[in-house]
Image (cartoon, rainbow, N blue to C red):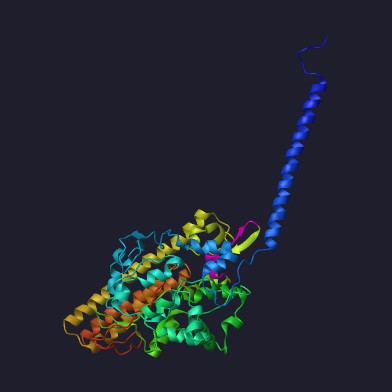
């Protein structure tokens, strides 16, 4: 006799059928959703660009390009972010806006963080105002409102690395890019600034028809041509001869470089005629007799390094391995089915997963620790070099006050010139040595050696002993000479 409370075989089979149907329905819906998603992503990848507006070779507003390339433009706009890494970046500090400077947030002052910088740059406008680097979004405003503008009248040359210049050059040169570049160099900064509408933009790096990368700054074209000529390559044309991968560094190298203003026309010039490492550039400066200013406290004819990321990177393992600037600072990313280069240009340490782990198969914590260890060692050597330089400056200053002649100071000036430029090269470069750790350490070691040799040379000179100079120094100008207009530095 069956138990009335037990389920019948028929009811059990019914529940099984219902459950099976339910599972099949859910699986079918999931599979359908997945197939629809795959189809949508494939369609997205087939149409990466929707041409909403016509872009020409005169379209300089990035917002117009953004209508056709909204994903890239969204990243470009995010360069307003202010996030620090351990050795760079700035959250900004609040300030009260004025009529002369309407900004409510400015970058932090590096001079307040390290007063030794004022000693190194004594008599130069950077000793008045020098701030943390910020993103590309701020590059034009931070140059416009720096207090350095109140110290000297800067030339239009400064606009090269702080603004979208391609259309400006074309208009000034009536279609001739180089003539426009030459015309802007010779303008007062205040006049050139009226022509600038945007920070660096799409048109400065991309052909508006093919979207191919291109170099638009004549100074970089001329610098690369001179450098290649030193290697035996005649008539090098960067836009004709560079590979696509090389262009992923060259477009950045248009601005992230060491340079100087040549002659009365203030022509922006990259000192690469003998090569790209610092020894090549020092030899070049010695040969042409260039000085950026005469040090106020010592009287030495000295040099100001700018932002030589391109040159230092060229000495490092990443460059030797074919890894370009964009690979780390603008790594590829996927948005839906579309693969793009991330235009939120920033430190790789803020984007380790996509910037570093594509090649390096370690954890984010490990990679960050390795990078910061390199930077911490560089920073320690930088501090040692800074202490050595300040000590030499103080010694020369005391000797001048005691009546030392120019002849007695000449050897010390020569060592100061070299030691200061080598230190400033690493100080001004924005990776704190990471782009080429071994080379950065070598440069700082040479700086320390030069400044200590300068102290020995000064002691021997004052004692009447024969001395040798590190490198021939140009004859310094009179102490009353006005300091020349300082060169611009990235986003300060």
Residue at the location (25% across, 85% down)?
409
Whether residue 201 can be seen here: yes
Quarter of image, res 413 = bottom left
Viewer-proximal residue, 322 or 209? Answer: 209
Q: Position of residue 102 (x, y in %)?
A: 34, 65
Q: Say which quadrant the N terminus sits in.
A: top right
Quarter of image, res 334 = bottom right
Q: Position of residue 240 (x, y in %)?
A: 61, 83
Q: Say which quadrant the C terminus sits in.
A: bottom left
Quarter of image, res 377 = bottom left
Queried whether the magenta region covers residue 349, the answer comes back as no
Badge count:
0
Queried whether the magenta region covers residue 335, the answer comes back as yes
Q: Left or right? Give the position of 246 relative to 417.
A: right
Whether residue 492 can be seen here: no
Viewer-proximal residue, 190 or 334? Answer: 190
Task: Name the outermost residue toward the front.
Answer: 53
| The magenta segment | 323-336
Up-down relation of residue 245 to residue 43 (above or below)? below
Q: Position of residue 371 (x, y in %)?
A: 47, 61
Viewer-proximal residue, 186 or 368? Answer: 186
Residue at the location (52% across, 55% down)?
364
Residue at the location (28% across, 76% down)?
151
Up-down relation of residue 286 to residue 60 (above or below)? below
């Amino acid at each position: 006799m069956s138990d009335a409370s037990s389920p019948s075989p028929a009811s059990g089979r019914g529940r099984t059928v219902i459950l099976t149907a339910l599972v099949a329905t859910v699986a079918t819906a999931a599979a359908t959703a997945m197939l629809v998603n795959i189809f949508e992503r494939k369609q997205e990848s087939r149409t990466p660009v929707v041409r909403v507006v016509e872009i020409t070779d005169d379209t300089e507003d990035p917002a117009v390009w953004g209508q056709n390339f909204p994903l890239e433009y969204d990243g470009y706009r995010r360069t307003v972010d202010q996030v620090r890494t351990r050795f760079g970046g700035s959250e900004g500090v609040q300030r009260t806006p004025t009529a002369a400077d309407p900004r409510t947030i400015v970058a932090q002052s590096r001079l307040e963080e390290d007063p030794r910088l004022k000693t190194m740059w004594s008599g130069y406008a950077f000793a008045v105002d020098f701030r943390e680097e910020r993103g590309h979004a701020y590059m034009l405003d931070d140059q416009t409102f720096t207090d350095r503008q109140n110290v000297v009248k800067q030339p239009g040359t400064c606009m090269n690395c702080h603004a979208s210049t391609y259309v400006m050059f074309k208009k000034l040169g009536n279609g001739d890019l180089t003539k426009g570049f030459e015309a802007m160099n010779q303008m007062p900064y205040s006049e050139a600034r009226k022509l600038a509408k945007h920070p660096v933009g799409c048109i400065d790096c991309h052909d508006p028809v093919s979207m191919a990368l291109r170099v638009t700054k004549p100074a970089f074209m001329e610098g690369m041509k001179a450098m290649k000529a030193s290697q035996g390559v005649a008539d090098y044309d960067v836009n004709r001869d560079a590979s696509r991968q090389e262009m992923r560094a060259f477009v950045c190298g248009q601005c992230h470089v060491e340079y100087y203003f040549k002659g009365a026309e203030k022509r922006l010039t990259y000192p690469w005629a003998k090569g790209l490492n610092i020894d090549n550039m020092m030899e070049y400066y010695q040969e042409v007799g260039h000085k950026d200013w005469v040090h106020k406290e010592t009287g030495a004819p000295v040099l100001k390094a700018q932002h030589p990321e391109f040159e230092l990177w060229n000495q490092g393992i990443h460059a030797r391995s074919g890894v370009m600037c964009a690979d780390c600072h603008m790594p590829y990313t996927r948005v839906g089915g579309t693969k793009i280069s991330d235009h939120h240009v920033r430190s790789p340490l803020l984007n380790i997963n996509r910037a570093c782990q594509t090649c390096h198969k370690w954890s984010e914590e490990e990679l960050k620790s390795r990078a910061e260890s390199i930077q911490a060692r560089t920073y320690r050597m930088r501090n040692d070099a800074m202490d050595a330089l300040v000590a030499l400056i103080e010694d020369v200053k005391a000797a001048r006050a005691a009546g030392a002649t120019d002849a007695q100071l000449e050897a010390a000036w020569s060592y100061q010139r070299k030691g200061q430029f080598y230190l400033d090269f690493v100080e001004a470069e924005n990776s704190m040595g990471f782009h080429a750790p071994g080379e950065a350490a070598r440069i700082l070691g040479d700086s320390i050696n030069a400044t200590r040799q300068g102290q020995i040379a000064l002691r021997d000179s004052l004692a009447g002993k024969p001395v040798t100079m590190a490198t021939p120094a140009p004859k310094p100008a009179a102490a009353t000479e006005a300091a020349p207009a300082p060169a611009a530095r990235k986003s300060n």
